[in-house]
Amino acid sequence: MSQCKLLFSSVLIATTLKLYLAFTTHGTTDVDGFYDHLTQIRRLGVGAYHTRGPFDNPFNSPPPMIYVIKAIGLLSELTSLPFHFWLRFFPIMAGVISLLVVWRLLKHCTELFPLLLALAFSPVSIIIDGYHGNTDSIVFMFVLLAIFFIDRPLLSGLAFGLGCCVKVVPLMFLAPFLLYLSNMKARFKFTLTGAGVFLFASMPFIVQDPIAIEKVVFGYGSIYGTWGIPQIAAIIYPVSYVHAPFEPLGIHRMIAITLKCLAVAFIAVLSVWMNRNRLSLFLQCGVITALILFLAPGFGPQYLVWMVPFVLLSGLRKTIIYYLLVSLYLLYKYTGLTEVRWLVPFGFALSVYCWLFLALLLSDYIRAAREARIDKKPQRAVRPMSHTEIVPPTECE
């Protein structure tokens, strides 16, 4: 069997497994949250931004998602397939498109086939796309498309803007994208297209209640105290919340604000440094993603799917380690083991290992960036690295 046929078969098997999970399982509490959002949107329209869900969760999706959530609800009614299936169907399809885009972005890698095979069978994607019930894979499909089309600022800006329509997460990549573009005209086209798509798709809601949207969507901090530095801080000193487990108070509020400020500062510094050396935009986005996940003041387990395409740059060995380690953590979170008291230390250890592994990946990326040659062609990744270096060679020159 040729490599292409084997890869196609792998994608088909993984996608079928995801669809099976989407159809036969209910998913996480995020599914209930989205269904509640649908109910509130139908009842209140833009007023849904002033409500909180069954888990004290706000409706924090950008305004264009009001149309999408209503469409998913309509699909469910027209097809008799459950809401939780359609909510996960689109992330599953996004995973297929993302693999094809990564294939093109890393087409010069000598170990491309095993990396793509690992990506196709990534248990992280299978669990999150097929079971969790959120939109992160769609967001990063658009981010990857924006990277792929970076030589055509209008198309890149369109993809970037569409990603922001699903979640505002792509904004963490705004500095690398703008600095990577070669001139002000290209930056203007990218920014105008991205902002225009977002504003157009947000009508009329963004005009009807801009303050609520700014506060809930752009000010959202996710769940505090379950990951990284906030988790360690919460063990040392108990957390109180405005709306548990969101919006921590006291010293924990200061920790969350400090981590946000540090993340913004590091993104700015790293973006300038990486673009002075004309590093691959794909590598730059991998650096920023690892940094954000490591410093995250708020966290959801589905965020770990963000690294799934970018971890390929660290080589096959570390890619497999990341996929397996994160999968164990997700299984712990999703199978009810969090309720087993004697397994709590095990779960904590898993989360710390995943968190520290992100720090290792970040260190590897920065090391690779330091040793990369100046890259004059936009879509190339870092130069080949020797087998003696910490990061395994992907040879993507």
Image (spheres, rainbow, N blue to C red):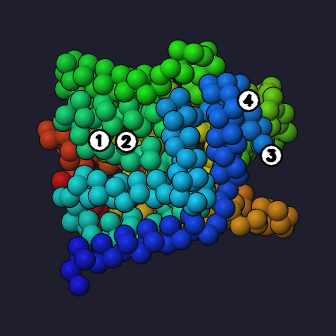
The image shows residue 385, relative to residue 70, as above or below, that is below
Counting from the top left corner in percent of width and height, residue 231 is at 72, 45
Question: What amino acid is labelled 3 in the image?
Answer: Ile
Earlier in the chain: of badge 3 and badge 1, it is 1
Identify which amino acid the numbered label 2 is placed on. Val
| Pointer 2 local density, CA inside 10 Å: few below 14, some 14–19, many at least 20 | many
User: For the residue labelled by badge 2, is the local secondary structure a helix, a strand or a loop?
Assistant: helix
* Mark with earlier residue (3, 2): 2
Residue 60 seen: yes
Q: Which amino acid does label 4 sit on?
A: Thr
- Nearer to us of marks 1 and 4 is 4
Tell me, for residue 60, which label it has, or none: none
Q: Which residue position holds label 2?
A: 143
Q: Which residue was labeled with disc 3?
A: 235
The dot on residue 51 is 4
Mark 4 Cα-neighbour bin, 10 Å: few <14, some 14–19, many ≥20 = some
Assign a secondary structure to mark 1: helix
Residue 8: where, in percent of width, then height?
Answer: 30, 72
Q: Position of residue 76 (x, y in %)?
A: 57, 54
Q: Calculate the distance from the C-alpha at mark 4 to the C-alpha at mark 2.
A: 30 Å
Which residue is situated farthest in the front direction here?
Answer: 78
The answer to whether the residues at label 4 and label 3 have Cβ atoms under 8 Å apart is no
Q: Mark 1 points at which residue?
A: 147
Amino acid tagged 1: Ile
Residue at position x 58%, y 47% in the image: 73
Q: Where is residue 119 in the image (x, y as percent from the top left)?
A: 39, 64
